[in-house]
Each structure stands twice: as C-alpha cells, then as structure tokens.
Image: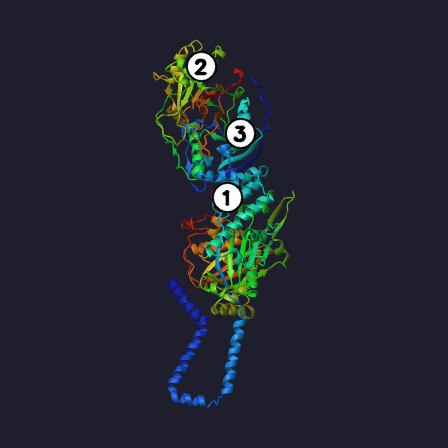
Amino acid sequence: MPDLSISVKLKYVKLGYQYLVNHILTLTLVSIMVGVVVEVLRLGPDEIVNLWTSLHLDFVQILCSSFFIIFIATVYFMSKPRSIYLVDYACYKPPVTCRVPFATFMEHSRLILINNPKSVEFQMRILERSGLGEETCLPPAIHYIPPTPTMEAARGEAELVIFSAMDSLFEKTGLKPKDIDILIVNCSLFSPTPSLSAMVINKYKMRSNVKSFNLSGMGCSAGLISIDLARDLLQLYPSSNAVVVSTEIITPNYYQGKERAMLLPNCLFRMGGAAILLSNRRSERWNAKYRLVHVVRTHKGSDDKAYRCVFEEEDKEGKVGISLSKDLMAIAGEALKSNITTIGPLVLPASEQLLFLLTLIGRKIFNPKLKPYIPDFKQAFEHFCIHAGGRAVIDELQKNLQLSAEHVEASRMTLHRFGNTSSSSLWYELSYIESKGRMKRGDRVWQIAFGSGFKCNSAVWKCNRTIKTPTDGPWVDCIGRYPVHIPEVVKL
Amino acid sequence: MVSPQQHHDHVYDLKLLSVGPGHVTGSDVVHDLTGLDLAMKLHYLKAVYLFSSHAAEGLTIMNMKEPMFCWCNDYFMTCGRIKRSEPSGRPYIKCNDCGIRVVEGVCDKTLDEWIEMEDGSRWNLLVYHRVIGPELSFSPLVYLQVTWFKCGGISLGISWAHLLGDAFSVSDFVNNWGRCMATLKANGSPTVAPRSQTTVPKPQPLSAKQVNHVGDLWVIANNCKMETFSFNLTTQHLSNLEDEHNPVSAFNLICALIWRSIAKFREGFEPQVVTVCRKDPNHDNNILGNTQVIRSIKADFSVVESDLNKLASLIAGDQNQGRDERNMIEASVEKDNGLTDYIIYGSNLTFVNLVNAGLYEMELKGKKPRFAYYSIQGVGDEGAVLVLPGPPPQGSTVIMAADEAIW
C-alpha cells in the first residue's frame, strides 16, 4: 500500500514541521540556555567572578538599570488590557406547550395560506430540508390560526424568555441584581419603548447607576456585538459585572403574507434566548468558565449587494417580512473570508501562518495558479460554534474551513433541537459541547455569527477550568438522544 | 315544533389553535384502523360538558393547555392524521403529533339560560365540528371547544371521529383529561382495543348498510332532512315506568316505547329491524376503540300492536334474540380491504345505551359537570336514539337524531 505509507510519512513530516515552527522560540531559548550552562560549567566559578568584576559596575548604574526594568514592567502590566471572564451563562428552555411539530406547522400554514397552495408547497419543501427537528418552539401567540401578534403578546414573550434566562443565571452564579454594573440587551426585531433593558431593570429592581444599553436591528450577529461592547466597557470600569442578554422575539415578526422569499424565516426562526455574565474582577479568575481572548468584527455594509441581502420590507400587499436574497451564501462566504483574514494572524500557530505566507508569496511572485492555502483552523481551536442560521450556512462553513462532522455537531444539533434562535444560538451550541463533557481546561472555542448588514463577527474564548456535565440547562433532558442523524430530506 | 331561532350570535369570538403531545411520538408510529373502525368512519360523536362557575373558577386557556399536552402524550393517536396506505388505499392514522384542534369561544348567556333554551340545535354552537376531508391529512380527528359563559361557567365541547372509538372511549378520554387537570400527571395510556383479523367469511350484517363511495369527504348523504331533539325523563318518570313493567329495565322500556311510536307514525313502513348498541361488559374501562356491542334485533310480529313488555324484552335480548354483529361487520369491511363505505347508526333505527358510560365522572376542581350531553353527527335516514344518564340525582335524557318528517 504505497499510498497509505506515503500519506502516513507525510503526516509525520507535517507534525514534525508544526512542532518545530510552533515552538521555535522555546527551542531557541532552550538551546541558548543549554549553551550558557555548558559554558558556565566549563569556565568554573572563579572565572565567572573575574568576568563580573571586569564589568566595573558601580552602585548607581545597578540602581538605574533595576529602576528602568521595574518601570518597564509596571508600564507593561498597567497597559495590559483587563482580562474579561465569562463567569457563567444560562439558556432559555421553552416549555413543551410551545412545541411545534412539522405536521402542525404545515397544517396551520395550509389553513392560513388557504388561497396560495404554491406557497404552502414551498414551505413544506423548506421544512423538509431545513435540518430542524420536531421539538422546536414558537411563542403562544403564533400557535393561533391565524396568529395573534399583538404588542402585548410580544411583550409577554419577551418577559417569558428574558426573565426565565435571567432567573436561571442568577441561580447558577449566585449573582444579586443589585450587583450588576452593566446591562446589555440585544433583540433585533422587537424594540418597544421603554426598551427591553428598561424592562429588565424594572423587573429586577437594579441600581439607579447601572449602565444599560439596548441594541436593536443588528441581526443574528448582535450577540457578539454585545459581548464586544461589554468588553470595551469592562476595560473602562474596574472591578465590574456585566450581564448580556441575547434573544430574538418572534411574535411581532411572523410573516403573514405569501411571498416565498419572506416565508423562509417563518420556517426557521424559533423561540430562544440566553443571559451571560461577564466580569473583570480578579476574584472570578478561578471559578469563571471562560476567558475572552479576541473579538473580531467584519462589516460588509459598504457593498450594496451585501447591504440588501437580508432586508426587512413590505411585500406587494403591505405585509412586512424579511426578504432573503439568493446571493446570501455567496455574500456570507465573502464576509467569512474577510473575518478569517483578520482573525487568522491572531490565533493561528506560527506553522500555519508561515505556510500561508509562503503560498501567498508563491502565488504573487512565482505562480499565480498555485492553489491558495487554506489555513487549518482546527489547529487553533478545539471547538467551533457556528451560528445555526440554517443548514446551508453550516454546510458552507464546514466546507470552507474543512471541518469534520464532529466539529460542526454542536451547530447541527442545536439547529435540530432549537431551530434558528438567532443571536442566542451560539450559547445553545456552547451548552451542547459542555453537556457532552467535551470542554476541557485550555480548550479554545471559536464562535462565528453572521447577521444582516452584512456582518460576520467572531469571538474566541479560552476555557478556564474543565467543565463538569451540567445538571441543568436546555440539553439536560435530551442530551442522551444526541447526536441524531439528520436526513437530507425528512419525509413529512 | 319550535322553529330554530337565529343562534349564530350567541357564541362568538372563536379562536383556534392546536394542542399536541409534549413528547415526540416518533417518526414511524401508526395506528391501524380495524374493519369496525372503518365502518364507523362516516359518524362523529359530539359531547358537551357544562360546568358551573365554581368548578371553572380561575381557569384560563393557558392553565388548561399544560395538562392537555400531558394528556395528549397518552392519546397521541387522536393527534394524528388519516393517510391512505399504498397501494391498497386503506386509511390508517399516522401519529405525527399534529394535534387536536382547540377552539376558545365566549357565550353571551348564562348557564341557566342556556339549559332552559328550547332549541335542540343550540348544542352545535358549543361544539366546533368539521368533517374529515377533502384533504384527509389536514383534517383533525378531534376538536375541543372551550366556551366561557356570562355567569363564569364553562362548557367543554368535543367533536370526535367515531373511527377512533365509541362513546365509551370518549367518556374515558374526557375523564382522563379531568384527572390530568387535577394532578398534572398522565393517567397512563389507554389500552387500544385489540385488532383482530377475521378471515372466516360471515353472513351480511343487518346493522351495517353500504353507501355510495364518499371518496375523501367523509360525510353521510341523507335523503331527508335530519333534526336532533331531546327530552328529559325525571327519576319519577323512570320509577313509574319500571314499577309498571317490572322486571324490565328503563332503557329497554324507553326504546320499546319509541320503537312503537315511530312504527305507529310510519304506517305501512314500520321498522321491523332495529340496532341496539351498548357497552361490552367484558371490557374494562380506559379502552380506546370501537368495542361497543352492536346487536340487530328483528321483530317477527307487528310492532304497532305489540305489548310493551314483549317489545322491551326483545330489545333486552333475554332469550338471545338478536345477534352481536361486530364480527360480521368486521368481516364485511375486510372483504374488500376497507374500500366500501358503510354506515351503522341510522342504517336501521338505532338505540344507543349510554346510561353506564360514566358521563358524570369527569371532575373539574373536584366538581362534577352540571350537565352532559352526547349526540351523533352523521346519522343515516332511519335515525338514532341515545339514552343518556341525567345529571345527579339520576334521571335520564333521551336524544334523538331523526327524520324531521316525524315532527
């Protein structure tokens, strides 16, 4: 089997190369130290003392040098950005009374769109290939035939989702509402007055000097934008807690018309929400779950096509819906490439960066037809959380980043069990990985989210302590059933 | 006969939603329909339970929904939809968790006013009913209507496809829901009636009549207009009847009386054969299926001139007159694999004994229903008579769906 032995040899060569380049600094230092020790041993103690006195160092010089070193060290430690810790997070688990099996969804569609059999047929085909399971949930108002999306119902859903997630977070972390210094709520499509952050402050009777922010209209990637905002604020305010609430309220946004491009979100978006506690306190260093390493945000809004590819507008009958353009996947691919170009140098090991640089030089100077080298991100991260925007998104990223089925398992299973919960899906995926007992200390996680605009945002976390399988959380009663095999087309 | 008033405004503000099982039933679970089930497919049962405001205090549709999901876990087959198997076209139920249709409504009358109203068709306003078809896979098998009355009382109206089970199954279904509401725990799945395959050819049943193919719209085509009428018999009435005609039971006497009256009215066309349905004494409670005993009774003598006692004892089947036709109906249907359409109720004058169906066992907040009313939707031309237990203290209600010409 010549092919097998060649590939095995190649694998070892590659491993050897990676080890060499990634640890070049260590190897160089070690060899220098070995050299010095050998030299010292050779010279003998007397020679060393002679060498020292011949330098003619006097007291002032020593004092100045040490002062200088201390000064540099202080400046370094003061200007180092504060470490941001993710203490814990909680995901909302919808009750079984909100469950929407495929058959019920289709029957309701059939009754609501009674004069548009083609639109019903379209929804059926989308649902069959969507990758969703039979346990995803919609809010109570949408269960009616026809749906009754009043503002009161929307507020009701917001209260249900957000308060449940926050209660769960308080219970897990022992946090008191009065200890929250920064509150950021992101919900793209529902923005009442007073804001959802004001609703939270009112419910939990938070302090009057809490710094609250409400991000709306920023799409599915708003979760990571909130994390970025929290990070910047935590750099400013020492010894503080920040709570980030990411959710999407479905009730007011269920499209009631018949345009196909706008019916797609109805098939995919489902109820969900998450509350995350971030802190910059030193005391959290030991019990926090993760440490935030990088956040990289990429915005392609300057390109008109990218700007219009996820667009909320009225259809011909005046019904408001979100229209998804056919170029969505191509634009997502472009945004991802931009994001990777920025994040690559920050996270990739030296071996990959060198290879990428060499192929880049090769393509530019020697042979333009040389295949571009796609860096192997599996070496930079142990876990991947890809926003569960839809089956196509996950397939596309799996292909582009050359990920294995296990790497995208968290994303696929979250899509199956919870549907597309928008900005909170990344947290359900992280919870899945923890529930499977795969999160070990030192593991690096890459969260990637796409959103309208068009934006691609990434966050990199490092696991602070090995996480025991949680006894609560959204996966606790069903993790045993996962992973499930999701067929290409489900027979309805 | 009182002409029906315009009732369509009394119950209004109808809101529809679906309630299904909380647990995923699974992707390939089916509920097969026996020959007897298929013979009943053109009939529907309607049940109404009225509860006073004490029993309904604090109830909202939200707090009724959660126990319903629990209850539907046990009754997942009622949440499925009809599909036809390939290539035979025989209908079966695919248990796809689609759900039962729940309807909320408001009524502008109080319970007392409602009970005192005279129009027999008013009960239809409390039961949201649609027939199965023309799209079989989008037709719910069970509808549940919750109507709030002006006085705070509520009514629960169930429309149930007879192919799922008989009135005794419906009563169990409702009683189980009452238990789920009280304890928020499932009572345990109902036992599904055994599916038996009878391949031995049997003679044609008298109680089942073939009808023209209905295709995918499961509704009976009547040749005459049908109306529903009911009257109450007090305990006094019943004890008088029984005293006079000891030792025959009240049900048989009522049936005999009605049979004779109808025969008198239809001079020259008096019904010689009747069908009598009653609970199978061999079956336990909590069974889902068409298990009731269906007997056809033939009178060799003139019904009009007969003695009441003689007619009543014929109906009672004391000397084994009349034959249990369940197996015969099953065999007839299986002969062509369920492709022929039949009717049972109304193929002959049919009497259904629901006196021991447990209609008053359902409890809401520990209180029994003020009134329970069952009727059959979809009855053949010969008509049907249901004898129900009255509200405690026991009396009886008799409900008849019959040819309007009789009135």
A296 or A485, which lies in front? A296
Chain to which the residue tagged by mark 3 belongs: B
| In the image, residue B97 above or below residue A465 | above
Quarter containing the N terminus of chain A = bottom left
- Tell me, yes or no, whether dots 1 and 2 are on the same chain: no
| Res A66 visible | yes
Residue B29 appears left or right of A190: left
Of the two numbered discs 3 and 2 on the same chain, state the one appearing first in sequence. 3
Amino acid at pointer 3: Leu
Q: Which mark is residue B257?
A: 2
Q: Tag 2: Cα neighbours inside 10 Å, few (<14), some, or many (≥20)?
A: some
Calculate the distance from the C-alpha at mark 1 to the C-alpha at mark 2: 52 Å
Secondary structure state at the residue bearing disc 1? helix
Based on the displayed image, in which of its 4 quarters is residue A296 positioned? bottom right
Residue A238 x/y as whole percent: 54, 65
Q: Tag 3: Cα neighbours inside 10 Å, few (<14), some, or many (≥20)?
A: many
Calculate the distance from the C-alpha at mark 1 to the C-alpha at mark 3: 26 Å
Amino acid at pointer 2: Leu
Residue B119 x/y as whole percent: 55, 22
Q: Which residue is labeled 1 in the image?
A: A98
Give me the residue at 65% from left, 44% from top.
A318
Q: Which residue is labeled 3 in the image?
A: B126
- Tell me, yes or no, whether dots 3 and 2 are on the same chain: yes
| In the image, residue A165 above or below residue B24 | below
Residue A284 x/y as whole percent: 47, 63
**Proximity of marks 3 and 2: CB atoms separated by less than 8 Å:** no
| Res A270 visible | no
